[in-house]
Every structure is written in C-alpha cells, then in structure tokens.
Amino acid sequence: MEQRLGNPQNTIAVIQKYDFVFQKKFGQNFLIDTHVLNKIILAAGITKEDLVLEIGPGIGTMTQYLAEAARQVVAVEIDGNLIPILRETLQEYKNITLIHDDILKVDICRLAEQYNEGRPIKVVANLPYYITTPIIMGLFEKQVPVDNITVMVQKEVADRMQVGPGSKDYGALSLAVQYYAKPYLVANVPPNCFLPRPKVGSAVIRLTRYPSPPVQVKDPALMFRLIRACFNQRRKTLQNGLFNSPDLTFSREQIALAIHTLGVSATVRGEVLTLEQFARLADIFSEESLSDD
Ligand code: SAM
C-alpha cells in the first residue's frame, strides 16, 4: 500500500482492510484533515536536524508527515492491533522507529540520549485525551530535554494551559505549564476533523520550553505542593487550603506569617495568586526556615 494518509477515504480504506476496531479506552480519534496536519508540522518548526517523538501514531497519518519533515521519528504506540498496520503504512519511510509500548512507561530521557545524543527533541502528538496531563507533566518534571511540545488536546485543556488568575480555568496545570514553557494556541480543531468524531472540541497548542523558568524559586517542589494544596480546595481561603493539605504540615501561625509577609489579605483565595506570588510564597516558607518536615 503506497498511499499518503490524511484524507478520510484513505483512512477508511486502511481501517477496513484490517477490520480495525476503534478502542475508546485508548482515546482513538484519528486525524483526517490535511490542513490541520500541515498546521501542526509547521507550528512544531521541524527541520531535517530534528528527532521527533510522536506519542500514539494511530495508523501512521501524522507519522508520514513527520518523517518527511524530520531527520528521525520515534513513534510509541500502545495498541498492538495498530502495529501491523503501521508497519505497512510506514514501510516506505526509513527514518521511523516504531516502539510498541505505553508512553507512560517509556524512559523518554533515555530515548533522547539514544536517538539524539541527549540534545533537545521535539514532541508532536494528537494525544490520547485521557492521559494528556500525565504525559505533559512527565515530560517537564522528568527534565526530558525538549525544545517544544506541539500537541492536539481537548479545547478546554488548551484553555487551562494558557490562562492566568481570574479565570475559572486557572489551576495547577496552568501554573505548571507556564513555569516550564511558553504556551501558544496554534488552532482550534472541530470534531469533524477526526474519525470517529470526539464529543468535545480540540485545539493544537505549542509549548516552547524555557531555557530557565520565568520565575526564580529556591524549592520548586515546595512551590508545587503549595499550588496543589490551593487548587485541591479552591473554594477555601489560602490560609485554610494550606493548613488542611495532607501534603503540608505548617502550623496556622507559620501560614499566617507567610501570607502576611507575602503582602496579601489573610482571607484571599489561592486561586488569585500569580505564578510569581506562588514562587515568592515558597521562598518565604524556605527563607523563614519554616520547614514542614
Ligand atoms: N496520531 C494518530 C492520528 O492523529 O490520527 C492517532 C491519535 S489518537 C487521538 C491517540 C493514539 O494514542 C491512538 O493511536 C492510541 O492507541 C494511542 N495511545 C493511547 N494511549 C497510549 C499510551 N499510553 N501510550 C502510547 N500510545 C497511546
């Protein structure tokens, strides 16, 4: 089979040939729109120098586009039923390595080392929506050398990644993404660009990793514990959110003192704090040796 995938007819032909049955549990919605595919490749800024990691290649539609733009593509697919299909749809491409595995179990730092001598890689994916957050957070927190991550996600998740205080979508994901990367909305993508159609709208977002974070904080892990404590109970005041968190053991007095030093009202909710303020709050706890151990 020598055909460029990306349009509905070719995708349907491949699916019928293999009697492929879509698995909901793997978030399988295949892209069938060439404009969207071209936009993703362009937004990722892929060159012939690049090693691209594709998460969830499906039947290999985007993989073909990636292979044409990049030096090398490593594609990780969990569904064993797709592997023989991928072997056929990608047989013309000599620069693709196909790995049958769960991306959450793959050591991506090692992949970058093995296929790109540890230099920053690009990650491109039409993500399985059920594991968007663990995939993206894993890439950042495990310090995978990445240049940018260009991914299709649920529209609502793309919104959450970009907003600041004052929005109902603002939360731990917004702060984590914005600590590590600069988000840019590439395109909104309607359900009719996929087979089968998802129930929700989608969006392509590019996250360009900062060489160093936009705020300085002595103990980033403590900052993220403070953030989680606030957003796990977002209707509570900052003071109560921090005090009630099972992750933190500061006394009421220590918390009151830190909030006072930060210069915000004792009754403020955590959800109004900016990334800079969370960083400052974490530093206050560290500086005052308010160890919670
Ligand atoms: N890239 C294809 C496309 O755009 O047409 C398919 C995208 S589909 C939304 C998500 C893909 O991720 C599916 O092929 C699915 O089987 C795969 N997948 C789901 N969970 C995965 C996991 N944990 N590790 C690797 N691949 C996974």
Image (cartoon, rainbow, N blue to C red):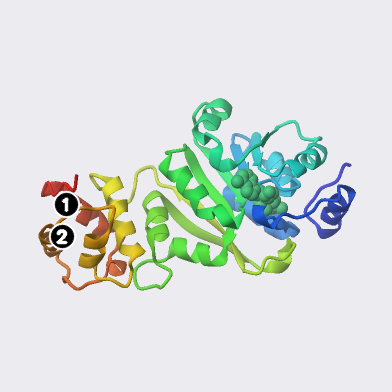
- Residue behind label 2 places its C-beta within 8 angstroms of ligand 1: no
Q: Amino acid at mark 1?
A: Phe
- Callout 1 touching callout 2 (CB < 8 Å): no
Instruction: Pick whichever of labels 1 and 2 is earlier in the sequence.
Output: 2
Res. 161 in view: yes
Residue bearing the label numbered 2: 255
Spot occupied by residue 95 in the image (x, y as percentages of width and height): 70, 32
Q: Work out whether 169 lies above or below 53.
A: below
- Residue behind label 1 places its C-beta within 8 angstroms of ligand 1: no
Residue bearing the label numbered 1: 285
Q: Work out whether 282 lies above or below 46.
A: below
Q: Quadrant of the N terminus?
A: top right
Tag 2: Cα neighbours inside 10 Å, few (<14), some, or many (≥20)?
A: many
Badge 2 element:
helix
Q: Quadrant of the C terminus?
A: top left
Residue at image location 11% in from the left, 61% down from the top = 261
Residue at image location 44% in from the left, 45% down from the top = 140
- Is 202 placed left or right of 183 in the picture? right
Q: Which label lies toward us, 1 or 2?
A: 2
Tag 1: Cα neighbours inside 10 Å, few (<14), some, or many (≥20)?
A: many
Quadrant position of residue 258: bottom left
Q: Which mark is residue 253?
A: none
Quadrant position of residue 24: bottom right
Q: Work out whether 53 lies above or below 231.
A: above
Q: Amino acid at mark 2?
A: Ile
- Is 154 placed left or right of 273 in the picture? right
Spot occupied by residue 188 in the image (x, y as percentages of width and height): 60, 66
Residue at image location 72% in from the left, 40% down from the top = 68
Badge 1 element:
helix
Res. 70 in view: no
Spot occupied by residue 119 in the image (x, y as percentages of width and height): 49, 31
